[in-house]
Structures are given as structure tokens and as C-alpha cells.
Amino acid sequence: MRKNICLAFMALLSCTMLTSVSAQYSLTVESAPAAFTPGHTIYRFYVNMADATDKFSAVYGNDQENLIINTPSGTFNSIYNAGWSASGLSPLFLGVFPDMAEDTYATIGLDGPASGTDADPSLVEDANLLPTISSYFVNGGTNLSVNTLTGGSWYVLNTAANALPDANLRVVIMQITTPGTVDGIINFQVFPLGVGADQQQISIPFNGAGTFTAGGAPADVLGCTDMTACNYDAAATLDDGTCAVLDECGVCGGTGIPAGDCDCNGNQLDALGVCGGACAADVDGNGVCDNAEILGCMDSTACNYDMTATQDDGSCAVVDECGVCGGTGIPAGDCDCNGNQLDALGVCGGACAADVDGNGVCDNAEILGCMDSTACNYNMAATQDDGSCAGFDALGVCAGSCVADVDGNGVCDNAEVLGCMDTNACNYNSSATQEDGSCDFCSCGGGGGPAASPYTLTVEGAPSAYVAGSSIYRFYVNLTDATDKFSAVYGNDQENLIVNTPAGIFNSAANSSWSASGISPVFLAFFPDMADDSYATIGLDGPATGGAADPSLVEDIALSPTVSDYFVNGGTGLNVNTLTGASWYVLNTATNALPDPSTLRVLVMQITTAGTVDGTINFQVFPLGIGADQQQVSIDFSGAGTFTSGGSTGPSNACGCTDSTASNYDPAAVYDDGSCISTVSGCTDSTACNYDSAANLDDGTCTVLDECGVCGGTGIPAGDCDCNGNQLDALGVCGGACAADVDGNGVCDDAEILGCMDSTACNYDMTATQDDGSCAVVDECGVC
């Protein structure tokens, strides 16, 4: 991976400086009065090339070769071009603001914004210049002197079509409109025959209009210098004696009409007195040559009058009832002049053989369909009902089969796909049509785990105010320190820069630039939808002012689309994936390289689209502003949210306990992961009889079982014989019901059983508990 973004174009010029300069290249300055800026003169600067394959690279200046432009009376700068180059001269505005065409600007081969394979020039400059190149061309400067070590340059890459000269082998590099004089020194770099290794740097002084060479002296141009001559050469500086005048035939330096001819083409008069005519005779003297006479009817009231005829042939006639010139009218039995009869519909010459239902439509022309105007499939063109009339189903589909759509989501109930529909969830189901409550926000690790870089990307979405049905997505890189500096957004074959917008992006016709530099506050009142334009940027939502700098763009022209084309022509996708790739960037000296001091973030892109947006952003940051410590970060994104370089493709899910009453409450958590531990007071001693396994805070209530098995009880009360509140009865039974046992036989008095207790008696009662004196013996007869 290429870890550094090359921004050292000026260093390249300094290292390859040549001491000898080719005389093949010169500078032509043309002047003309300004049409819309009274009292001003427009000076256009052209570099004259030697071959159609030569390529123009750059205009530059530094401490070795100063770039100097002196305009002591100041320059005219249209308020409608907020840029330093011609890229802001949108053709859309020229009809409304014609003085834009007379704006002062720098360029390379262009009079407006680049299109096709052309490329708008890029600018690098030392911010310590006073004024800077961009300030001179925007604020009506009186002098530009690029003379520092870093210096400045406007340039295009070798791949841009506008690096080649025009049909006159020249390249326009600058336009200056001023009420006074202009002079100075122009330094430029050329690639002879397009070969970069053979580059030449040429320095040419100039003063006003003319053609100038590297030696500083205008080059003589031979030609006629007499302005009254027909061959006057405005470019000539030295008369070569060829001046001439027009003769009577309009020939410059000619001898006029030859003797005997009637015109300048060598013709004579013919029989009709026509110069150069071919008529040999006109016998009847009607002014028509005999061999050109046209025979025909010359009576203008006749139906066969021939306005081209020059001689009447007696053929004049009149129109009959059928409109036939000289005809005999409608034949008997016919209904018209064409030999037709009435058909079944009473149409003369009609083709209808029958109309059985008598509806005025021929049977073979009937159109079958639903003729009920209240039906959803009503066919207003139908002439015969076919019984197909139907109504709308639950989805509003005519003759559809959907019985119900209870939730009104446009999906039939029997076709619903249940699943999680929250894009922030780990188990988000893009195919789901109905939420089933299964969303899980935490099983995937709270948004992809820790980020690999401290710098993150935030995408904010909001409805568009001027583009119906669209949303505006603003992309911010979040820095960590107020002194961090943002360098560039980039892409190449190792780290692809990808922006997917399948529904296309909105591009205001009022901003012809790929960046925010074309969104001039002057135009917003006239074209308010400019505020919703899609553009690339670094920290700006309009043209740069003060110490800020509009971002520069370098890009591989082989990209399809290029970065500039995507942001100008409403692209559906951008994929910067070639070896050269592309990047928009600012130098370390630009104030907009620093983050917003209140939010510590930098705006890098705005996308307005009616659909979705996702992709990958690669960017370079200088921590604490130190270039040697640069970091390159790659972050995937999808829709709105905050994204990290750790692989998150959606907003970070901060998971944890969200219950503020829990002992492990996490105030940073967004989603509850089920880990909450509620604060439960109770006995935490597992040996205690009132141990609470759910308690996590001991409340000092732990106790033991008493003799009655009561947790924390005081035992058997005094006087009781057990834990149930009982006392001993007359029989000594705890809780017994015996009130007395007078005889002390262990049987309660009210439970005594009276009977004979003598086991030798014949009436012995083994169940008796108290002898009642009834014992007897068997008499001699065996009777007890």
C-alpha cells in the first residue's frame, strides 16, 4: 500500500529545472476591448507549441524563476465566478450574467468547466504569498509575484485532453481583464511530443499584446501592414511589400473584367440578353427561349391551369362533382365518387359486413373488456362486456389475490417474512417485512469490537428541502485533538474508495464543479437547490475564504466514472480502484485542514439521493498536525450512523446494563444485553435459616431455627408442653382432651368402659376399663 499521498508538484519542477530553453515555444498575448466591462481590455495569453502531440503541463513560479503579473490598475473579477480558474464559468449562467465571459482567471486550455476527458487545472501554492495565486484571480489584484521557495503552480496531469494544443497549435493559459496595462514574466513547463522525461521549463517576459520569445523580444511576423489593403495581416509586424486592392470583380490584386465579356466569369450576352445565358433563339419574343417553351393550359380559371406553361395548348377544362378535372361525375348506383356502396353501418365504402348487436360497432371490430366504470379494470375503449370486471384486493392490486394486509405495510399477510427489521441489530434481516420482536443488539459484540483507529466516521441524514423524495447525507471525519490536521480522501488499487448510490445522486445544474467551490453564496438566492448539491470537500460547504483553500483533485482519467464526473453528472456509483487512483486534498497550511473546534470533526462529502448510500471511505490525517506521523484510515459505512475502522458496517451498538437501579448499571449502554444485576437486600449467609439466594446485599437479618423449627423464633412458651401452644391433660398427654382420671387408671373418666374385669367370670369383658360389679359364674345348668 502506498502510505503517502504525493503532494509535491512544486518540488518536481525545482528538481528538473533546465538551464537551456527551446526556442520552439513562444508566448502570444492577444487584446480586445471588453464588451460588458466599459473601459477595460481583455488580454488572452497563449503558449505556442511546436507539434500537435506536445503536451502542456503547468504554469509555475518560485524563488529561482519568479512568476510576475503586473496590473497596476487592478483586474476585473466577476462576482459570479467564485473560483480562481475557468471551472466556475458555467454556461448555464452566461445568458444571465454575460460579464462572466470577461472574468480574470487562470486556465489550461479551457474557457469553462472541464467535460469529457478534459480536466480542470489543479492549484498548489505557498500560503505565505501575498497575494496568493487564488486571491489574485478572485479579488481583483494589482500585482502577483510568486517568488518563495515553495512558490505556486496551476497544472493538469499528462492524461488530460486539454494538455494538448488546439488546431492552431496553441494552449490558452490565462485571461486578464484590466482598465490599464499588463506586463510581467510567464514560466511554463512543456512535454515535447508528450514525453514527460523530456520536459522543458521556459521563462518568457511580456509587455502588453504581441508574440514574445524566451529572449524577451517580440518575434517579427512578415506580411502586409497597410490596414486599407485587401490582404492586410493584423499579425504582421514587418511589411513585405505584398499589399494590394480589390478589382471590380472582388479579386485582391486582380485586373477586372476582360474586354468583350459581360461579367467577371468570362460570359457573354445570349438571345434573351442574359449574361452567360445558353439561349440561341426566341422566335415568338415572349422572353422564353424556344427550346425551353412549356406547353399547357394558360387559363388561370381552368382546373388544369399550368402556371409554368409559357405557350397555351388548348387543353383547358373544369372540375366535375367528384372533383375530377374534366370528369363525368358519380356513376349511377354508387354512393360516392370512388365507386363505393353503403356497408352494414351505413358507411359509404365501409368494410363492415355485419353489426348483429346494433351498437354501431362492426362485429369484427368489437373490443372485449370490462365496461363497468366502477370496476378497477374498467376499459373505456371496450365496446362489448366480457364479464371480466373486478375490484381491488387488500393491497390495492386490481383483481389481485390478497385477502388481507392487517398491518398495512403493503405485503399480503400470507406473504409476510418475519424477522428483525432494525438495521442496528446483530440479526437484522434485510428480507423481513414484519418485525417479530427477535432483534438482538448485543450478541455480535456491541458493534464489531474495539476500533483499530481513534478516528471515526459519522454520516448524518436529513430530508432534502428542495429535492422531493431525497435525503441529504453529510460525511464527517471525527478527529481527537483540535491541532489534528486532515489531509486527503483517497482511493487506489490497494485501498478502494467506494460510494454506492444505486438511485443516482442529485447535482444542481447551477454548480458545475465537483467540489463545494462552485456553491457561491451569491447564487443561493436564485438557485436555492444548490445547497442540496452532491459534492466532495474538505471542511467547506462553499468556496474558500481567508486562510482556507479549495481542495485540489488528482485522478486517473481511465476511471469510469472519474471522481469529477461522478460529482457533476449524478452518478450511481464511484469505485476508485486503479494503480494511479484519485484523491482530493488540501495542503497542511490551509485552515480548513483543522477540525471544527467545537465538534472536532471535518466535513468531507455531501450526497443527496432518493435511495440508499454505502461504501468505503479512505482518508489521511496528520496527528497534532505532524506530517511525519500521518495515519491512513479505511472505514466501511452504510446509511446514517457512526462507523469505526474495526469493521463495523452500522452504528455502534453500545451494549450493557441499562437499568439504573441495578448494581452493574452502565450509563454508556444503548442496548440492554441482559446482564443487569438488581440490588436485592437480604440474608447472604447460606447456613442461616433465612438465607436468600437472590440477595446480593446482606441486611443483617440472618438467624437460626429455634426448638420449634421457627426461623428466628424464641422456642416453647413457658407453661406449654409443645410448640403448638398445648398443655398436659389429666392423663399427662400434651394437648390431650382428658379433664379427669379420678381412679388413676390411665383412662379418662369420660372414656371409661364399665364391665366385668374378672377374667375367671363367665361374663368377663376384656374391653372394660372399670369393673361395674357384674361378674358372674356358670350355674349347674350351664347358665352364666
Image (cartoon, rainbow, N blue to C red):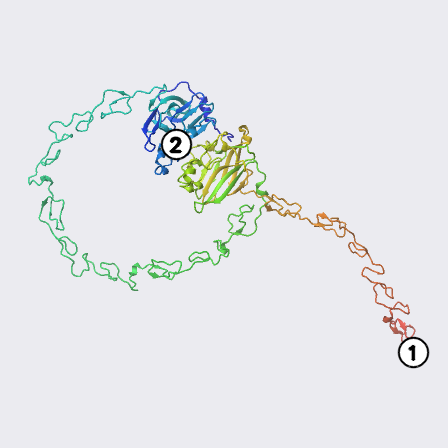
Kind of element beneath mark 2: loop
Q: Nearer the viewer, residue 539 or 191?
A: 539
Q: In this view of the protein, can residue 37 be seen by the observer?
A: yes
Indicate the position of residue 354 as horizontal and vertical percent values: 27, 62
Q: In the rendered structure, are the residues bearing label 2 and label 1 in contact, judged by CB atoms less than 8 Å apart?
A: no
Apparent side of residue 727 relative to residue 654 in the rendered image (left or right): right
Task: Work out whether 532 lies above or below 11.
Answer: below
Residue holding disc 1: 778
Apparent side of residue 705 relative to residue 366 in the rendered image (left or right): right
Task: Work out whether 659 lies above or below 39.
Answer: below
Q: Residues within 10 Å of mark 2 (few under 14, many from 20)?
A: many
Q: Return the disc, 2 or 1, that comes first in the chain's sequence.
A: 2
Identify the residue shown where x is 47% and y is 23%. 149
Residue holding disc 2: 77
Indicate the position of residue 536 as horizontal and vertical percent values: 46, 37
Q: In the picture, residue 393 is in which quadrant? A: bottom left
Apparent side of residue 155 relative to residue 295 in the rendered image (left or right): right
